[in-house]
Structures are given as structure tokens and as C-alpha cells.
Image (spheres, rainbow, N blue to C red):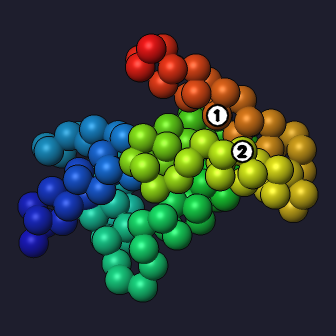
Amino acid sequence: MTEKRSELGRELALEVAGVQMPSFDTTPMANAARDFVFGEVWSRPGLDKRSRLWITLACVVATGAPMPVKIYARGAIASGLVTMSEMREFVLHFAMYQGFPKATVMEAALSEVEAEMAAANP
């Protein structure tokens, strides 16, 4: 059961966040992210991946933490679940409810992701 959960967690982390998780135990935090966050929560029925991604984006942007914001922004675009124009609209809507300072973290992350993707696909 644990191995199956870990494998599912690795697959979903790569698909929705673009994060390569190790197949072996590392730190308690990395193991929890792989096995619980992605292996259990993201794989539950009731919400599709796109809905879970929007909820996750709202939550990580609300923290104002640049690294997770950029990781999930990149993953959202790369997965094809969300378009860049939808993300830009999200930033404006988010700013109305959580404030412009926090929204600027997402805006900056989107600009970086857009530039990186353009450079990778000239």
C-alpha cells in the first residue's frame, strides 16, 4: 500500500506541479509531500485536478511564499490544466480578495515562468 501511494504521489507531483519526487525515503517533509499531499489528497475523488490546482494556487499565493507559487504556476501551465491568460485573470481576481501585495508575488512568478517557457521553446 505504501509503495503504491508513493508511486501515485510521484506521478501526480510531476503531472500537476512539475516536481520530480524521489522514489526512496528522504526527509520527513519530502516523504509527506509525496505520499500524503500528492499520493492521498490529490488522488481523492470529489474534485478534479483542475479544481484542486486552482484551490492550491489560491492557498500558496495567499502565503506570499515565492518558491511554491512559482512551482505551482509553472506546473499549472505545463500540465495544460490552466492557460496563461486564465492565470493572469486569476491574479487580478485574487488581488481583489487578498490584496495587491500578495498578488504581485503571483504576477512576478507568472512573468518568470512565461519567460522561461519562451526561452525553452523559441
**Image point 11% across, 65% down: which residue?**
4
Residue at the spot of label 2: 88
Residue at the front extreme, as displayed: 122
Q: Is residue 104 above or below residue 3?
A: above
Residue at the bottom extreme, as displayed: 46
Q: Count every numbered label the image shows and give the total.
A: 2
Residue at the spot of label 1: 110
Q: Secondary structure at mark 2?
A: helix
Q: Could you tell me if the residues under marks 2 and 1 are in contact, i.e. CB atoms within 8 Å?
A: yes
Residue 82 in sight here: yes
| 12 relative position to 101: left or right | left
76 or 24: nearer the eye? 76
Q: Residue 93, percent across and down?
A: 81, 57
| 12 relative position to 23: left or right | right
Q: Residue 14, percent across and down?
A: 30, 46
Residue 98 in sight here: no
**Image point 42% across, 74% down: which residue?**
48
Q: For the residues carrying marks 2 and 1, which lies nearer the camera in this image?
A: 2
Q: Residue 73, percent across and down?
A: 55, 42
Q: Residue 114, percent across and down?
A: 58, 27
Q: Residues within 10 Å of mark 2 (few under 14, many from 20)?
A: some
**Image point 45% across, 14% down: which residue?**
122
Q: Secondary structure at mark 1?
A: helix
